[in-house]
Amino acid sequence: MTPKYAHLLDRTVRYHEAGAGRALILIHAFPLSADQWLPQLHRVPPGWRFIAPDVRGFRGIGQAYQDVGLDNARMASHAADVLSLMGHLDIDRAVVGGLSMGGYIALAVAMVAARRLDGLVLADTKATADNEAGRAAREAMIALVTAKGPEAVADMMLPKLLGETSHRDQPELADAVRTLVLRNTAEAIASAVRAMKLREDATAWISGLTCPTLVICGAEDALTPPADSTAMAAAIPGAELVILPGAGHLSNLEAPMAFTEALGRFLGRIS
Ligand code: MLT
C-alpha cells in the first residue's frame, strides 16, 4: 500500500488510507508505525474509510521528512495531531481507535474532543497511568535507546510484544515486527516513552464516555493483560469486550482475521 502525506501547518504526517465512507482513525502501538494496520486496511468494510497515521516521529517506508516537536510531545500533543489530521482531511467526526500506545492517544482524543467521536476502539491498552515502577522502567528505556539505539529496544520488547502462540506458530511475525521497530529513530522512541510516562490516568473519567466503545485484547497479552481490558470495559458504559484467543499484545497482527471481524461487527452496529 502506498502511503499518503498530509502537509500540516507545522509538520508532515505519513498515513495510510483505504475505503470510502465514514472514518475510522487507527493509531499504532509503540514502537511501530502506521504499517501495523495493513492487515485491517486491506479488509475495510463497505461504507468505511480507514485512516492510519504515523504517531509523531514514527515512520515506515516512504519519503524522508523532518521530524518536529519530539522534545516536548505529550499525549495531548498526539491527540492534537490526530485532530489536525482529521481537520486536514475534512473529517468532522470519526471512530477513533488505537492499540496500546495508540489506545492512550485515542483516550487523549476522547478527553478533549468527545463530541467528535462516533465511537472508540481500545485495543490491548489500559486507562491507568504508570505507577512508580512503570515510570522508572520508562527512564531505563530512554537511557537504553539513547545509548544503544532502536535495536536494543526491539531485543527487549519483542519477547513481550507477541504471545506464546505467535512465537511458536508464526515465528516470521517476530521478524516482521522487528523490521517495523528498526525503521524508527532513537529520538522518536525516546519521545514516545516520555509521553507514555507522563500520561494521565483516565480511569476517573471513562465512566462518562457516551460513545459506542469496543475494548479488544489478546488473551495472551503480557504487557496489557486481559484483566486491564476487562476492568476498562466494565468502567465504560455499554462497552463491548472481545478477548482474542491465541493472540498476545499485538493482537491485530497476531490474529488479523479475528481482530478485523470483531472490528467490522462493531462498526456495523454504529448508527
Ligand atoms: C505499546 O505497545 O504501545 C506499549 O507497550 C505501551 C506501553 O509501553 O505502555
Image (tube, grey):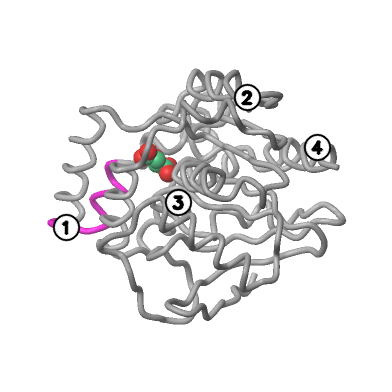
Quarter of the render that holds ligand 1: top left
Pointer 4 and pointer 3: residues touching (CB < 8 Å)? no
Determine which of the numbered discs, if any, sits on residue 265 in the image.
Answer: 4
Q: Quadrant of residue 189?
A: bottom left
- Say above or below: 176 vs 258: below
Q: Secondary structure at mark 2?
A: strand
Specify whether 63 is left or right of 51: left
- Amino acid tagged 2: Ile
Determine which of the numbered discs, if any, sits on residue 129 in the image.
Answer: none
Residue 265 percent location from the top left of the image: 80, 37
Confirm or reject: label 4 Cβ below 8 Å from ligand 1. no
- Amino acid tagged 1: Thr
- Say above or below: 95 vs 58: above
- Say above or below: 57 vs 96: below
What residue would you read off at disc 2? Answer: 243
Specify whether 149 is left or right of 25: left
Magenta stretch: residue 151 in it?
A: yes
User: Which residue is painted at 82% across and 52% down in the image?
Assistant: 45
* CA distance for labels 1 and 2: 36 Å
Q: Which residues are magenta?
A: 147-156
Pointer 1 and pointer 4: residues touching (CB < 8 Å)? no
